[in-house]
Image (tube, rainbow, N blue to C red):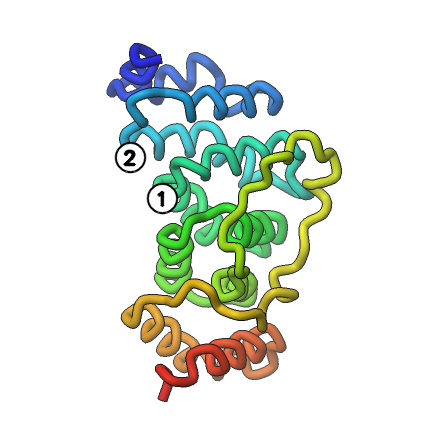
């Protein structure tokens, strides 16, 4: 394993991924490959993990026109369990920049935020959203960030055994008004509030925006003046 870890950290990693056709390999193999990655010692470098996130998932996620298969979700959650920062930097950033509705991609990001990402990665997602022009497409992502549950992140351990998991995703809006368990850093909260205030005229008729503002003011009323 240590030898393979060294190979995956080499400058020719992209060429190796291309040679192995990782971007188009069958999804069951993708699950096994990600499980194997988690067992590597030492851990992959940030750069290597980012390259693998791009090679393994970017094309698959951006081409989604329906909910991801259980194998793809299992691979995603497995990879995120150990390498969520580089994953967010590569894949979430690409989804946020993608033009158009991107409904399935947005739902996927929301699910990963709600179920898998650690608090620091959730904050990273929020900062990424606030770096791009706010749109109706991105409001559910903000809702997901603000709707983290009491239990915190919980990648499902029995995911592979549940063939219906991929189609059983719930709307992030159902958690919108739940209790906040992960307090945002003051500077990130200030940026969120400032963004919501500046964008108010553009979302005058948006129910999702109104719910988002209400939730923010309700939970952070002592910090928001």
Q: Residue at x 47, y 77 (%)?
A: 219
Q: Position of residue 135 (x, y in %)?
A: 50, 66
Above or below: residue 191 compared with residue 83: below
Picture residue at 38% right of the left edge, 58% below the top: 123
- Compared with 85, 113 (above or below) is below
**Left of 152 or right of it: where is 66?**
right
Q: Is residue 200 shown to the viewer in this render?
A: yes
Quadrant housing the C terminus: bottom left
Residue 167, disc = none
Q: In screen coordinates, is 146 left or right of 160? A: left
Reading the image, the residue beneath label 1 is 85
Which residue is more in the foreground, 97 or 34? 34
Q: Residues within 10 Å of mark 2 (few under 14, many from 20)?
A: some
Q: In this rendering, is residue 14 above or below 111?
A: above
Q: Label 1: few (<14), some or many (≥20) within 10 Å?
A: many
- Residue 46 is drawn in which quadrant? top left
Q: Which residue is mark 2?
A: 46
């Amino acid at each position: 394993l240590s030898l393979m870890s060294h190979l995956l950290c080499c400058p020719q990693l992209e060429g190796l991924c291309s040679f192995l056709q990782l971007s188009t390999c069958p999804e069951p193999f993708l699950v096994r490959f990600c499980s194997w990655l988690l067992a590597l010692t030492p851990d992959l470098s940030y750069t290597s993990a980012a390259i693998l996130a791009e090679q393994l998932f970017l094309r698959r996620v951006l081409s989604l026109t329906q909910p991801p298969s259980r194998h793809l979700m299992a691979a995603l959650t497995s990879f995120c369990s150990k390498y969520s920062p580089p994953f967010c930097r590569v894949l979430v950033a690409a989804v946020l920049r993608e033009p158009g509705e991107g409904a399935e991609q947005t739902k996927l990001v929301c699910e990963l935020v709600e179920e898998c990402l650690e608090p620091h990665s959730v904050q990273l997602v929020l900062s990424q959203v606030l770096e791009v022009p706010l749109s109706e497409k991105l409001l559910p992502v903000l809702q997901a960030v603000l709707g983290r549950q009491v239990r915190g992140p919980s990648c499902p351990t029995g995911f592979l055994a549940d063939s219906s998991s991929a189609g059983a995703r719930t709307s992030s809006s159902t958690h919108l008004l739940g209790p906040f368990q992960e307090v945002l850093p003051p500077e990130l909260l200030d940026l969120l509030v400032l963004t919501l205030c500046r964008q108010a005229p553009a979302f005058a008729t948006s129910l999702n925006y109104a719910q988002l503002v209400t939730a923010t003011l309700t939970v952070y009323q002592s910090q928001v003046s």
